[in-house]
Image (cartoon, rainbow, N blue to C red):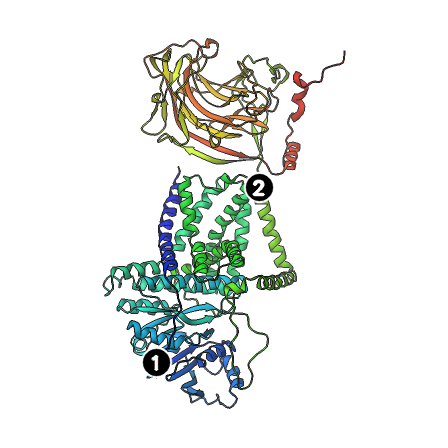
């Protein structure tokens, strides 16, 4: 197992352990009883609701409307916090309250209306940042409690009253309300809501059940005024996280209102979806590192410290996911064709440019760095997609998995799917799950996952490079026409996830998306880009390389062949085997299809789930195989020892290994590569080969001890299907090839490749011999078992007289690599290559095969 696979295993293990915390919270969430309760108490505490806004237009009036509708019986002051009179909300306020003058520049706080104990104000703070607006007004107020409601939220009517009751019951100073979405009719709206209103709320319920603190979200929060005045909001990207960590260090505990809170607008497009997460990843991580050294001395319990670490590294986990993703890409790319690699590279660069182009980043260096980080994330994704599609087309699921133990793959899959499982559990627990929402969430999860991590990686890049980007983002599509009327403000209906994904809502969403799709064709450049992307993906999936390999054997001698059926005489195949060596090319071999690593075994140990050490013998074998003769070499590999000992009626024992006798360990086509050193004892055969019986088919690479400067290559063929009793043959069709070195002196790599059209034999990656169909036999076509062994033969003709020696007579096998073969997807590519590099016609052999000829008329 190479270093990339070890890195993959380590990262999978770490992410799986981290995911266990999520699964634990899900279990706590599902076990927690969520029942409604009545709030009959009527607290009379004075409360100020702060609504910071920045050019939210008519949306801000909805927040005001929901605040005015609060059923709190005590004094309630509502403050809309604007920077100045240029804010876009002011024109809608003027329409709704025509009797109020907003033009007096000297006045910073203007009372707009009073409805019983509820008073509405607009405050011009002169500050742009949300935190500065809140701090500015908080210092001027003397209410007992302060509540913060973002301007794109609509508060539930009982939010303030229920929060005050819960604060009094728990003797706490701050409470976070429950949040939901106003509408989730689009892809980005749905996934923004799933993250914020399902995922976050799961952890709020779990933390509450575990008696842990909550981390405020910067909105729908009620707290004692003194708590905010003593801990002013920091001017940073995520002032809510910074504030939460600061009060946690003081031992304060934020509790949860699971009954009432608010519903908010969510991201309507890719720009807003990515920009929000980018800012959160940057600011959240910065706040975490600002407080990580303080948690040690803070007056909190060990459970609180663990919770702080769990919460703080939330976005940093994306780096481990990124590293794992990149590692998997590097593993997969090794088995892909250059064209597939190029297609993945180019399409990833195009997608990276398209995604980062939505973010409006300033500066050449910033844009380039963002493209590179997104490319590094998307490139492995395209490789994984190409590999998956190839596996689906070939209907071979094994191509879509990594060459690591199945248990680790399952563990890694559970870890990587943790976000999806958490969200589905949340939908179930919040009674938002039905067939439509389940299908839609599962189908769209991969796209949401990659976009989410893309945004987080850009945000972490901002953090590392100390870029404090804050962009205005839209939380909902802007209305084309104002609905505000003179003397009137109102909210909008709430459409939750479950209702958004009902059939009627889905059909409406399809209609809207179809309309957008048709408008897409008005921009030919975008259409061209997508055509290029689809074309690149098509090439990457469907093109399989065909390599022209020169056949340059040192010397080849055809030994006596069987004359049984299904064998063409070598005399009728002039280029079949050269008797002399002149160092010149004797032909071409066409390698079609592709080979994918199935197993790489350095034989540090004998895997009993894959290998059998045999306890048997056969005709003409002077020894009995037994498992004890297969011993491990300390530095890696196995030694198949040939010993003189009486056993089973024979005078010697030896060693043999074979793949397990089950379906998964029989191979139909592939590449089989062994690094070995054969026995140099006369009369001893050291070999690896593929073999089956009923019908007998076999492909050999054998060393004969009398001369280890040569290698014997052989094929046995019989037609039929498994179970057919065609087992003709004795010698087979052997050829002897000169290696040009003594194989017994050192390790070398030997390989045989077997596909539907050819068999090829290699020594140290040099092609020394190949056979096409009918030269001199048809190509074996049935699954076979893979063997390695050493044995003394009774055939003096084959290996010379057996002369036992006092020295070690065994063979050493250092490693084994097995590759599975995938055929070319398009035969016309093979035809085209044949045209460029002519071969002897494939069907030519039939003319020389007597058994294929029709009987002549007398």
- Residue sitting at x 66%, y 21%: 846
Q: Residue 219, position in %: x, y?
A: 40, 72
Between marks 1 and 2, how big is the CA–CA gap?
A: 67 Å
- Residue sitting at x 39%, y 73%: 38
Q: Residue 405, position in %: x, y?
A: 41, 39
**Mark 1 or 2, nearer chain start:** 1
Q: Is residue 279 above or below residue 537?
A: below
Residue under label 2: 393
Instruction: Check disc 2 and report its element: helix, strand or loop.
Output: helix
Instruction: Check disc 1 and report its element: helix, strand or loop.
Output: loop
User: Looking at this view, is 165 or 806 the one in front?
Assistant: 165
Residue under label 1: 43
Q: Quadrant of the N terminus?
A: top left
Work out whether residue 231 can be spotted. no
Work out whether residue 622 can be spotted. yes
User: Looking at this view, is 12 or 833 the one in front?
Assistant: 12
């Amino acid at each position: 197992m190479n270093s990339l696979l070890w890195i993959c295993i380590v990262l999978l293990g770490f992410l799986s352990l981290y995911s266990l915390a999520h699964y634990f919270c899900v279990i706590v969430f599902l076990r927690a009883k969520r029942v409604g309760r009545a709030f009959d108490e009527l607290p009379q505490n004075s409360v100020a609701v702060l609504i910071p806004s920045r050019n939210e237009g008519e949306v801000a009036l909805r927040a005001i409307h929901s605040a005015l509708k609060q059923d709190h019986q005590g004094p309630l002051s509502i403050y809309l916090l604007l920077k100045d009179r240029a804010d876009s909300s002011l024109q809608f306020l003027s329409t709704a309250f025509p009797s109020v003058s907003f033009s007096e520049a000297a006045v910073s706080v203007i009372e707009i209306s009073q409805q019983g104990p509820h008073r509405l104000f607009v405050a011009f703070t002169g500050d742009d940042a949300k935190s500065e607006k809140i701090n500015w007004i908080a210092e001027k107020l003397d209410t007992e409690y302060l509540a913060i409601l973002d301007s794109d939220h609509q508060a539930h009517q009982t939010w303030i009253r229920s929060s005050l009751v819960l604060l009094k019951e728990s003797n706490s100073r701050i409470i976070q309300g429950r949040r939901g979405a106003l509408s989730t009719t689009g892809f980005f709206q749905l996934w923004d809501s799933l993250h914020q209103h399902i995922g976050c709320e799961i952890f709020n319920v779990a933390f509450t059940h575990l008696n842990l603190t909550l981390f405020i979200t910067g909105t729908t929060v009620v707290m004692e005024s003194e708590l905010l005045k003593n801990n002013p909001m920091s001017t940073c990207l995520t002032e809510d996280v910074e504030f939460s960590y600061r009060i946690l260090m003081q031992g304060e505990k934020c509790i949860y209102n699971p009954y009432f809170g608010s519903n908010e607008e969510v991201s309507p497009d890719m720009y807003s979806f990515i920009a929000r997460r980018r800012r959160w990843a940057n600011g959240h991580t910065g706040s975490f590192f600002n407080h990580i050294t303080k948690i040690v001395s803070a007056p909190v319990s060990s459970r609180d410290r663990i919770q702080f670490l769990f919460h703080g590294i939330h976005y940093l986990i994306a780096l481990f996911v990124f590293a794992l993703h990149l590692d998997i890409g590097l593993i997969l790319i090794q088995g892909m064709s250059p064209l597939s690699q190029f297609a993945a590279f180019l399409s990833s660069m195009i997608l990276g440019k398209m995604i980062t182009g939505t973010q409006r980043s300033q500066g050449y260096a910033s844009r380039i760095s963002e493209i590179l980080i997104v490319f590094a994330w998307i490139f492995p994704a395209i490789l994984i997609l190409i590999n998956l599609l190839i596996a689906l087309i070939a209907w071979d699921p094994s191509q879509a998995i990594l060459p690591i133990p199945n248990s680790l793959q399952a563990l890694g899959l559970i870890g990587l799917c943790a976000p999806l499982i958490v969200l589905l559990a949340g939908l179930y627990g919040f009674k938002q799950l039905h067939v439509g929402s389940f299908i839609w969430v599962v189908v769209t999860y991969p796209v949401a996952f990659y976009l989410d991590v893309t945004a987080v990686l850009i945000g972490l890049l901002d953090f590392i490079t100390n870029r404090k980007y804050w962009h205005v983002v839209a939380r909902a599509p802007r209305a084309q026409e104002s609905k505000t009327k003179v003397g009137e403000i109102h909210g909008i209906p709430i459409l939750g996830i479950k209702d958004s994904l009902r059939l009627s809502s889905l059909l409406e969403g399809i209609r809207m998306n179809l309309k957008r799709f048709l408008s897409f064709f008005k921009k030919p450049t975008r259409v061209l880009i997508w055509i290029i992307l689809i074309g690149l993906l098509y090439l990457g999936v469907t093109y399989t390389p065909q390599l022209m390999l020169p056949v340059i054997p040192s010397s080849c001698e055809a030994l006596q062949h069987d004359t049984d059926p299904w064998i063409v005489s070598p005399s009728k195949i002039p280029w079949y085997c050269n008797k002399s060596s002149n160092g010149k090319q004797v032909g071409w071999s066409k390698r079609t299809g592709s080979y994918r690593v199935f197993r790489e075994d350095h034989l540090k140990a004998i895997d009993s789930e894959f290998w059998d050490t045999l306890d048997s013998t056969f005709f003409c074998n002077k020894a009995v195989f037994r498992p004890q003769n297969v011993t491990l070499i300390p530095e890696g590999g196995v030694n198949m020892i040939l010993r003189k000992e009486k056993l089973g009626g024979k005078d010697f024992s030896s060693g043999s290994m074979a793949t397990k006798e089950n379906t998964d360990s029989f191979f139909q086509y592939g590449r089989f590569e062994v690094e070995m050193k054969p026995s140099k004892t006369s009369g001893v055969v050291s070999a690896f080969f593929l073999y089956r019986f009923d019908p007998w088919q076999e492909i050999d690479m054998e060393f004969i001890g009398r001369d280890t400067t040569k290698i014997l290559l052989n094929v046995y063929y019989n037609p039929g299907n498994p179970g057919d009793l065609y087992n003709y043959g004795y010698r087979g069709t052997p050829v002897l090839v000169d290696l040009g070195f003594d194989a017994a002196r050192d390790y070398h790599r030997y390989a045989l490749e077997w596909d539907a059209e050819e068999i090829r034999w290699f020594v140290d990656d040099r092609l020394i011999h190949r056979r096409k169909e009918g030269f001199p036999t048809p190509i074996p076509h049935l699954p076979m078992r893979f063997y390695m062994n050493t044995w003394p033969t009774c055939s003096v003709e084959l290996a010379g007289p057996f002369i036992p020696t006092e020295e070690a007579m065994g063979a050493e096998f250092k490693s084994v690599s097995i590759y599975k073969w995938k055929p070319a997807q398009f035969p016309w590519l093979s035809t085209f290559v044949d045209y460029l590099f002519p071969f002897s016609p494939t069907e030519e052999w039939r003319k020389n095969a007597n058994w294929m000829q029709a009987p002549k008329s007398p």
